[in-house]
Amino acid sequence: MSSVLNSKVPEGPLAEKWEKHKFSVKLVNPANKRKYDIIVVGTGLAGASAAASFGELGYNVKAFAYQDSPRRAHSIAAQGGINASKNYQNDGDSTFRLFYDTIKGGDYRSREANVYRLAEVSTNIIDQCVAQGVPFARDYGGLLDNRSFGGAQVSRTFYARGQTGQQLLLGAYGALNRQISNGKVKMYNRTEMLDVVMVNGEAKGIITRNLITGEIERHSAHAVVLATGGYGNVFFLSTNAMGCNATAAWRAHRRGAFFANPCFTQIHPTCIPVSGEHQSKLTLMSESLRNDGRVWVPKEARKGLTAKEALNIPEEERDYYLERKYPSFGNLVPRDVASRNAKDVCDEGRGVGPSGLAVFLDFADAINRDGEDLIRSKYGNLFDMYMQITGDNPYEVPMMIYPAVHYTMGGLWVDYNLQTTIPGLYAIGECNFSDHGANRLGASALMQGLADGYFVIPYTIGDYLASQPYEKVGTDHEAFDEAEKTVNDHLDKLLNINGNKTVDEFHKELGKIMWDYCGMSRTGEGLKKASGMVKELKEEFWKNVKVVGTADELNQSLEKANRVSDFIELAEVMIQDALDRAESCGGHFREESQTPEGEALRIDDEYSYVSAWEFTGNGAAKLNKEDLVFENVKLTQRSYK
Amino acid sequence: MLNLLNEAINRTGIKADKTIKNLNMNLTLKIWRQKNQNDKGGFESYQVSDVSPDMSFLEMIDVLNEDLVKEDKDPVHFDHDCREGICGTCSMVINGRPHGPKEGITTCQLHMRSFSDGDHITIEPWRAKAFPVIKDLVVDRTSFDRIQQAGGYVSVNTGGAPDANEIPIPKRIADEAFDAATCIGCGACVAACKNASAMLFVSAKVSQLAMLPQGQVERKTRVEKMVAQMDEEGFGACTNTGACAAECPKGIDLSNIARLNREYIGAKLKSENVS
C-alpha cells in the first residue's frame, strides 16, 4: 500500500471493528466540548444531521448553506427511500446481507470496513427518524412498510410515498432548528464556502461569500466538516439542483485533500428524456417505479414511436429486455446495468419517442393486477410530476425514460474516521467517496448521508479534537489573509475578463464533452480526445467568459462563473481517472474491457484500488493508490441473470 | 431550439418520420425589477421569441437572461434550485397568482404549453411585509425558518430513540400526518393571502406533530411558541378566505388551520409555558 494513505481501518473481525474503534478513539469530556468550534458546510442530510448531533453533544457549531434555508438542500429531492437491515419483513435480511449487497452492488471497489459500518448503523437511522416524527409509510397494522429496490432481493427500503428525502431532511432540519434555537448552532444561509484556511497543514477555518451582500467573511474553528454533496453538475444536465456545485470540495482539493475515484459517476436509468436545447436540468423518476413498471422497447425499430402508439404494439412484438436478459432480477437490476442496457437498445435503433433516446416504462400490467388506486397511492406524486412535464398520462400510456447523471460515487478521499488527507478536514455524505464503490444501490444515499451525520462523525471527530488546544486560530492569522486574497483574486479575474460567451454556454459545452466521452461508456481514445477538448475549453473560458455585475451585490452570474471554473478543473481529473482505470466496473464502462456477452469486465488483479488524486498545480494530478483488501467477501463477476 | 433534438436524432442513425414541428411562441413579459432592498423598484417589459411549449417557465427566463447578459445588462434575479417542485425555492407571482395559472404545482413545474402565442405575462415577487424583497424576484423568507426554530420539531437527541416499530401508528393517522408534512415552505400561502397570513404554513407542521404519538410531549408548548413567533414576524391574521389552500402547490388542506386553532385554544386554556 502506498505509504501516503492510511485508511485507519481497525484490526479485528469485520463485525467487531466499529465497536472496537468507538472504544479506542479519544473522547472529549462533556464539559470540554463547549470549548471546541466546528464548521459544517452544507445542510443536506449529512450536514444537517451532523450539525444537529454536534450541537446536542455540546460543541459550538457554525453551519453554512448556499440556499436561503437549510431545508432546501438537494437531499430534499430524493424520492424512493432509505435502506435499513431491520428485517421487519422476515425475508432473511441482516447486517451482513446489506453489507454484502452494497459491496457487490458497488462492484467491489469500496472499503469493506466502511460499508459494514454503514449497514450496522442503518437500523439506528430508522429509529431516530421515527422518533423525530418522520411519517414513513405504514401498513394497516400500524407498523412500518417496506418496498424492494434495485440490486436487492429483500424488502428493506423504508419510504414516505415518493418523498422520502423530503421527510428525512425535514426531520434533520427540525433537529438542526432545535440546536439553532438552543444557541448551539449558528446558521449562515445564502453563504457559500470559497476556500479552506490551512494553518501548519491543518484545516482551521474557511472563507465564505455572503451571496446577498457579496461580503467575503472569515470563520475560524477547530475542525471543518464538508457536507457539500456531489459534482454531477459537471455534466450541465443532471438530476442535481441548479445550485449543486463542487466548489467547496474542489477548493479543499487544491489545498491538499485528495480526490478519490472522480470518474465514478452514476447514470440513473429512469429520468424523463431531454426535450430540447433549452433544457436546464433533468428530472428523475424514482427507481422504485421499476418495482411495478416493466421496461421495454419494440423488437423491431419503430421510428419516433409515441407513448400512445405503444398501446397498439402487441405483446409478441415487445422486447422486455431486462426481464429477458436478467431473469432473476428482471426490472430490478442495479442502476448501471439498467442504464447501459437502455443505451444499448437505443444505439441499436430501437429507442422510442421523437429523439429515439428513450425506452418505455409500462404500468399497464400493474394497474390491471392491483388497480389504479393502489398504484396511485404508491406513486401518485411521481405520475403527476411526469404528466406535468411531458403532457402524457402514465395511467393510460407508458412512460418514456432515459438515463441521466444522478449521483457521484467519487469524492474527497476519507479514512475510516471520515477525515480527508488534510488533518481537521472531514467529508461526509455524497461529498466523500466512502461507501458506494463504483456504483451506488438505490435508497443507499439517504442511508449514507444520515449514517455519516448522525452516527459516525459525532464519534470520530472527537479523536481529532481531543488532541487540539482549546485556543482557536485568530481570523487575523496570515493564513486567513492569504486565503481571502486567493478568493478575491479569483472573483476579480472572472469579473474582468469581459468576454463574449456566457457562463452557461461554457457549461453546456463542458457537459457535452463529459457526457459523450466520460459518461455511460468510455474508450481510451475518446478520453484522450476529451482531455484535449477540456483543456482548450479551459483556456477559452479564462479569455472569453462574460460575467456581468459586481462582486459586492447579489450576482447570480458571478456565482455560476465561479462554480463552472471549478467544474472545468474537476472534469480534467475525472478524465484522467477514467483513463487510468482501463477496466469496466460499476458505473464505469470501458469498452475495451467487456465479457463476450457485452457485460462489464472487471480486472481485479490490476485495479483493486481506490484512486486518490493529489493536486499538483501543474495541470496533471498525481495518482496515489489505496489497495482494497477483501477478507469477508469473495470477488465474483457480478451477475444478475 | 430544436437543434439538440434533431442532432440527437441524427446521432442515433434513425431516420425520423417527420421533423419536429415548430409550435413556438412570442411573448411579452412584464417583470418586477428592483436593484436591492432599498430601491423602489418597478416593472420592465421584455420581448421573448421562439419559446418552445416544452420549456419550463424558468427555462424561458433562463433564455431571457442569456440574452440580457449578452447585451451587458443585469439578468433577472430569481430564486430556484431543484427545478422539480420539492425544494420550495422558486417563488414567482405570475399574472397575479403565486406559482402561476395551474393548480398543484410550483413555478419550476409550470411549462410553457400552459401559455399561448402573443400572451402578456406579468411576473412579480412574493409580496408580504415578512418577506422583504432582496433583489428583483428574490425575497427573504428567513421568517419561516425562525417560526420552525421556535418549536417545529420533536426534542429527541441522536441515539436516544426506541425501536422504530415500538409504537404502531394507525395507517390513517400516518397518512394524514404525511399529507400535512409535505409542505415545502415556499410561501405561496402567504403570497396568496390578502392579509399575508402564514397560518397554513404553521398549521402544517403543528398538525403533523399533533397527530403523531412522538409529538405529544411538546404538543402544547409547540403550538404556543410557533404562533407567538409567527405574530412577531409580522404575518397578518387569518380571515379564513382559503386563498392559501387554493394556491398551495402541495395541496395542504385548509382543515389544518382548523386543527391549528383547536390546538392553540386548547394549549392556551392549560398553558404550561410561554408568556
Image (spheres, coloured by chain):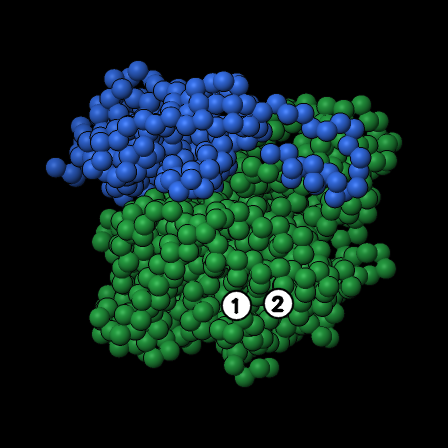
Q: Chain of mark 1?
A: A
Identity of the residue furthest to the bottom in this view: A3
Location of the N terminus of chain A (image quadrant): bottom right
Q: What residue type is disc 2 on?
A: Gln
| Residue A38 x, y percent position in the rendering | 31, 64
Q: Is residue A483 visible?
A: yes
Instruction: Give the crowd class for mark 1: few <14, some 14-19, many >=20 residues within 10 Å.
Output: many
Q: Which mark is residue A576?
A: 2
Q: Is residue B68 left or right of residue B6?
A: left
Give residue B134's position: percent from left, percent from top: 28, 39
- Choose between B214 and A106: the one closer to the eye: A106
Q: Secondary structure at mark 1?
A: strand
Quadrant of res B270: top left
Counting from the top left corner in percent of width and height, residue A57 is at 30, 61
Residue type, numbered disc 1: Phe
Position of residue A163 measured from the top left corner of the image (x, y, whole percent): 50, 38
Kindly give the residue lying farthest to the left in the view shown.
Answer: B275
Q: Which chain is blue?
A: B
Q: In the image, is residue B243 above or below residue A318?
A: above
Q: Using the image as rendered, state which of residue A135 and residue B44 is in the foreground.
A: B44
Instruction: Tell me what residue is drawn at x 57 percent, y 66 percent.
Output: A573
Chain at numbered mark 2: A
Count of numbered tags: 2
> Which residue is more in the foreground, B252 or B46?
B46
Specify the colour of chain A.
Answer: green
| Residue of label 1 | A259
A306 or A169, nearer to the observer: A306
Tell me the residue at 37%/54% (across/down): A495
Q: Circle 2 sits in a helix, a strand or a loop, which is it?
A: helix
